[in-house]
Image (cartoon, helix red, strand yellow):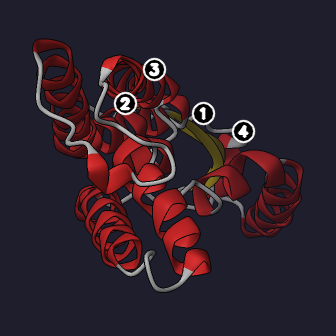
Amino acid sequence: MRVYLLLPAFALALVASPVRGQAQALALSARDTAGPAASGVANQPRPKSRSRAQVLALGHTLVATGTGAALMNQGVESQWKGDVGYWLFAYGTLIAPSAGNFYAGDARRTSLGLQIRGAGATLVLGSVISQILTSPEFDMDNPEGGDLHWDAVNVMGSGLMIGGAAYSILTAPRSVTEHNEKMTRAHAVRIAPAVASGGAVGVQAGINF
């Protein structure tokens, strides 16, 4: 709901032409004085895009994990590809899903998603290290000599990572909605000079509820 308040400064301007001219001059002066308030309307931040937030989250995740996995598969022939692939895959699984929340400036959801996936990655890494250290068949010089298997800890950690990624990607649009609502409330009050049809000078205020 928008409320307008018109405060006339010179009632005689309606009937006296010389005074009307003076009122119009004062209107220009009032517009200059109210520059910061009036410019606030023109400089209001543009709303962010819900679809862009979700594309950022999903796109970063799929591209980074897909490219990383492909390069890791080539790591046997090229060490640098394997190293780059490892870091890309880590980025795609741990950080990239929060790109949409980060774009919307939602620190709470960004942090929560990172924490969930970080906890899952810790469980997965712990399971892998435990199997390496306890497996009599595993040889650090020949990793193919022993097979890693899925245990309860590994499954739980992977589930947390997948769930954390889904949470971040799916909540990205909501983060944008809340950001835009906050910006709207922050710019809810508008004050600008106004000139009535008769030439009266006043101040126009608008309030959003």
Residue 123 visible to an observer of this rendering? no
Q: Which residue is mark 3?
A: 108
Q: Earlier in the sequence, mark 4 or mark 3?
A: 4
Amino acid bearing label 2: Asn
Q: Are marks 2 and 1 in contact (CB under 8 Å)?
A: no
Front position in the image: 27 or 130: 130
Q: Is residue 101 left or right of residue 202?
A: left
Q: Residues within 10 Å of mark 4 (few under 14, many from 20)?
A: some
Please name which of the two marks, 4 or 2, marks the residue nearer to the observer. 2
Q: Which residue is mark 1?
A: 7
Q: Quadrant of the N terminus?
A: top left
Q: Residue at x 21, y 37 (%)?
A: 148
Q: Residue at x 42, y 25 (%)?
A: 118
Circle 4 sits in a helix, a strand or a loop, which is it? loop
Q: Which residue is mark 4?
A: 9
For residue 18, what is the image quadrant? bottom right
Amino acid bearing label 4: Ala
Circle 1 sits in a helix, a strand or a loop, which is it? loop
Q: In the image, residue 79 lies at what x, y percent?
A: 58, 76
Front position in the image: 173 or 205: 173
Front position in the image: 29 or 140: 140
Q: Which mark is residue 208?
A: 2
Q: Are marks 4 and 1 in contact (CB under 8 Å)?
A: yes
Q: Is residue 108 left or right of residue 189?
A: left
